[in-house]
Each structure stands twice: as structure tokens, then as C-alpha cells.
Image: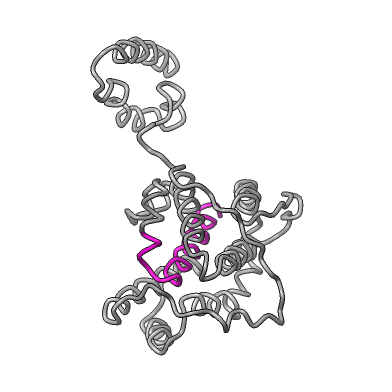
Amino acid sequence: MRLAVIFVLALSIQILFANDQKSAPEQSFAEKMRPKMMKILGEVWTVKLIGADKSVKTDEVPMPVLPKVIDDAKSTAVYDKKQDKVSIKPEVEQKYNYAFIREIFEATRQTKPNDDEIGKLMNVLSQGGSREGVYRSLVLDSVYAGMENWDKPVKKNSADFAVYFYNKYLGKTIVIKSLEGMNLFTLKRLVTEKALDMTDAFGDEHRGDLEKWYANMSADMATKFPSVWTNVTRKNASATYHKMWASKVPVQHVKSEIIIKLHSAFNSML
């Protein structure tokens, strides 16, 4: 019965859709029906029947050439970084930091921080500590080490995404077989670490390329994991929108978004 309904609906829409092509350039009947079809039939069948939503563009920003990541434990480049060109007023930054701490806790540990934990990390940030540093303190301690011993093996969907992300955004090739037996909490930490290394590799002089890289990644995440995001900015599938956002915030804010998005995406595949 369901297939019969879909067939009749498809035939009717195709006829009306063909007629729409001959009329004035306004929203077609098919596009007007898209929201209802998404609700009734789901995204897969809707796209099969009337095609993808062409009003949603995710490739508006060209991907930059990926820089070479220098993996040198003796490198002192981290100490040579210039002061960020973009800054935020301390009183505003404090509000953003509070929200960041709550989100980073939930993304990495899947739990809410208590008042004491929030206070300690807020103190770290107020004294000049970085968001990246806060993140590393959460995934390199004994609590997260314990989570990496949980019985949470990497599944096919998370392995496929890791292979895709490594290839497109890190310029590296890995095989799914190499991820067999790995704990998912370990995988998401490693992928995030490599993404942060790529962020640093762009350097201060190529911030524009970093923004392009981030914009494409964010648009991609919005498209691949639409149900994960509640924040309207993260739900936006426009790369242009994300590039504009990245150009107006400190690099540490860009890094914290990368961290939260990657961990949250992998969490949805537990």
C-alpha cells in the first residue's frame, strides 16, 4: 500500500512539476510540497521523487590547498604564533567561555560539568589559557582514559566517516581495516587532534585558507549530521555563511567549533 501511494504521488508530482517548468519563475509545486513530503516520506524518498533541494548550496567556497603538517616533537613553532588579529571584549568572551565549557564537557564526556568544574576551567581561561588547552586537559586525563577502555568499538558508519574526513580534510589515506578493534572515544580524539594540527599548519599568514577549510567542513557536517545540531549556526549548510562567521572570531573559537562538531558527530554514531 505504501509503495502504491508513493507511486501515485510521484506520478502526480512529476506531471505538475513538468507544468511548473513552463510557468513563471516562482517556487514550484514540488518545492512547496517538499516540507510535507520530508515529514511523510523522509529525505531519501523525497530526493528520489523530486530531486535535491537546489536552494541549499554547500559548495559556495572553494577548498584551499591543504598545507603540509609538520610532525616534529622538537618544533617550537607553537611559541612563535602572533597575537590573533580578531579579539572579543572580555565581558562578552566570558559569556562565550561559559557556554564553551558546558558544550565541551558534553561533547567529550557526554555529561554536564558541575559548578566546581566550570569554575576551575573558567579560571584557566580568564588567566589566558586557551580553549584548545582546556580541551586537551579533558581528553588526556584519567577520566577520558577510562572511557577509552569502555566497550564502545568503532562501527562501520563511524569508520566510513573517519576515512572520508581524513581524505578530504587532512589529505591522508587510511583504510577501514586499520580501525578494527579501536575504541570510538580513541578514534574521535585522534581525528580531532589531526584536525587541530591542520588548523595550525595553515599558520597566521594563511588565515583566509583556514577559514575556507573550516567553512567547507562545517557545511559538510551540517549536511551529513542534520539531526545532531540544535544551534542554528551549526545547522546552516552554507559554506559562505561559515566562512563569514570564522572571519569574525578568534582562531580559538574556530578550533573549539571543530572540536565540538567532530566529537558530537562521532557521539551520534555510538
Hey, which quadrant is residue 45 in on the image? Answer: top left
55 w.r.t. 157: above or below? above
Q: Locate residue 244 relative to residue 139 in the image: left or right.
A: left
The residue closer to the viewer here, 263 or 270, is 263
Taking the magenta stretch, the answer to whether it contains residue 260 is yes
Residue at (40%, 39%) from the top-left corner?
A: 57
Residue at (71%, 51%) from the top-left corner?
A: 173
111 w.r.t. 19: above or below? below
The residue closer to the viewer here, 82 or 229, is 82
Residue at (32%, 28%) from the top-left corner?
A: 34
The residue closer to the viewer here, 113 or 198, is 198
Hey, which quadrant is residue 189 in on the image? Answer: bottom right
Taking the magenta stretch, the answer to whether it contains residue 48 is no
Q: Locate residue 9 relative to residue 267 in the image: left or right.
A: left
The residue closer to the viewer here, 147 or 102, is 102
Q: Locate residue 26 relative to residue 164 in the image: left or right.
A: left
x then y, percent, for residue 259 = 50, 65
